Amino acid sequence: MSTPRAVINTFVRSYSLNIPKFQNAAKKAEGLVRDILVESGLEIHQVTSRIKSIPSIRSKLRRKNYSKPDIQLTDKVGVRAITYYGSDVNPAAAMLKEEF
């Protein structure tokens, strides 16, 4: 059985090798979210994406004590959409929820 440190190190090595793949996925997801929201007619201020940083991954894996981080760590890629108006948040979220 692997120790928590070994699990973390193995996952981080694998993640590091796949950073370009995750960056590409983040940009594609950002574009898709932007397209969906623009087509909705809502006024969107900004759509951005990011991949989880290695320090953040290490910290989360230590905190959560995941035994299978490749499955359990679900926020490797994130997209954020910012609306101009608070009243547009729920419609934007509903639209994205419906699409995904």
Image (tube, helix red, strand yellow):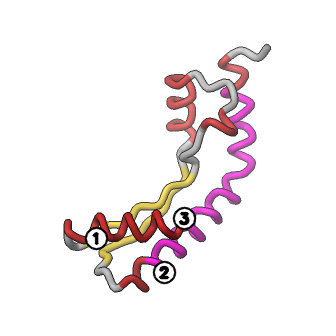
Secondary structure beneath label 1: strand
Instruction: Tell me the quarter of the picture where residue 48 sits.
Output: bottom left
On whether residue 84 falls in the magenta region, the answer is: no
| Residue type, numbered disc 1 | Thr
Q: Which mark is residue 35?
A: 2
**Picture residue at 59% right of the left edge, 39% below the top:** 73
**Picture residue at 28% right of the left edge, 65% below the top:** 89
Instruction: Tell me the quarter of the picture where residue 53 sits.
Output: top right
Looking at marks 2 and 3 on the same chain, the residue that comes earlier in the sequence is marked by 2
**Picture residue at 56% right of the left edge, 36% below the top:** 57
**How crowded is the residue under tag 2: few (<14 C-alpha within 10 Å), some, or many (20+)?**
few
**Magenta range:** 8-36
Looking at marks 1 and 3 on the same chain, the residue that comes earlier in the sequence is marked by 1
- Residue 43 vs 9, above or below: the answer is below
| Residue type, numbered disc 3 | Phe
Screen quadrant of the C terminus = bottom right
Secondary structure beneath label 2: helix
Instruction: Tell me the quarter of the picture where residue 68 sits.
Output: top right
Q: Which residue is mark 3?
A: 100
Q: Which residue is mark 1?
A: 83
| Residue type, numbered disc 2 | Asp
**How crowded is the residue under tag 1: few (<14 C-alpha within 10 Å), some, or many (20+)?**
some
Image location of residue 86, percent across then percent down:
20, 66
Image location of residue 91, percent across then percent down:
32, 70
- Residue 47 vs 35, above or below: the answer is above
Contact, mark 2 vs mark 1 (Cβ under 8 Å)? no
**How crowded is the residue under tag 3: few (<14 C-alpha within 10 Å), some, or many (20+)?**
few
| Tag in front: 2 or 3 | 3
Q: From the viewer's side, name the closer residue of 9 and 96.
A: 96
